[in-house]
Image: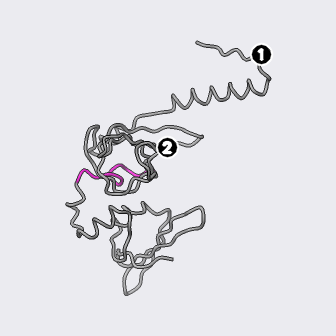
Amino acid sequence: GISPHFSHMPQNLSKFLFALLLTLTQSAFAQSSLLPELAKAGFSVGQVVWTLVPMHNTDSDTNQDPTLRGLTRIEIVDAFEGVEHGRTWRYLSAKLRTGKTAKLILPGYRPPEQLLSSKDPKTFGWSNSALKSVSQGRFFFGMTRAQFIAVLGYPDDVNESGDRHGTYEQWVYKRYGGDDYFYFRNGKYEAYN
């Protein structure tokens, strides 16, 4: 193998470069395929699917908006897990309608069938106005849980309660500037705090 020669460098710089080289080497080998997991859920490379949740696009060249909205049509190119900055990330490489390939972060550790659908959203039984709002990333009162998840993704926490009038859920989205709270009654979005 190649042995870097650091004897002519200051000791701190040589330690830094060696640590950097080690980190890059480990990151390159810390990648594993998620294609078997996708296959178990019925998805395959080359298949056209729709996103059921928003996904962060790490390739700024393919999309000016860093978030790919829910209900976006994509073609699966690859899926893999990698370690970056000491954290494990799950990625989906996907071809967009523009023909460009995007590297999307798969949110959370949810099974693929909770993140992707092989069915066109037009077959979901949603109204045209609901499909339009969700595909534009807008939420509205009365939307279902699935529609809401397609706009904002899965909540970080859900608090449930109920009485004779029905069931109530508080969905919590943890944000850097403070938490956002959304309220559902009998499965329909009805309030924000």
Local crowd at mark 2 within 10 Å, few (<14), some, or many (≥20)?
A: some
Is 181 placed above or below 30 here? Answer: below
Q: Is residue 61 magenta?
A: no
Q: Residue 71: x percent and y percent?
A: 31, 57
Q: Quadrant of the N terminus?
A: top right
Is 66 placed above or below 152 here? Answer: above
Q: Which residue is mark 1?
A: 8
Q: Which span of residues is magenta-colored?
A: 109-119
User: Label 1 to label 2, Cα distance in Å?
Assistant: 37 Å
Examine the image and state in which quarter residue 130 appears: bottom left
Image check: 121 left or right of 137?
left
Q: Secondary structure at mark 1?
A: loop
Give the residue type at disc 1: His
Q: Secondary structure at mark 2?
A: strand
Q: Which residue is mark 2?
A: 89
Towards the viewer: 75 or 173? 75
Q: Residue at x 59, y 67 (%)?
A: 178
Is 99 placed above or below 22 here? Answer: below
Give the residue type at disc 2: Trp
Q: Residue at x 34, y 56 (%)?
A: 52
Local crowd at mark 1 within 10 Å, few (<14), some, or many (≥20)?
A: few
Q: Residue 28: x percent and y percent?
A: 52, 29
Q: Residue 24: x percent and y percent?
A: 58, 29
Which is more N-terminal, label 2 or label 1? 1
Q: Residue 36: x percent and y percent?
A: 34, 37
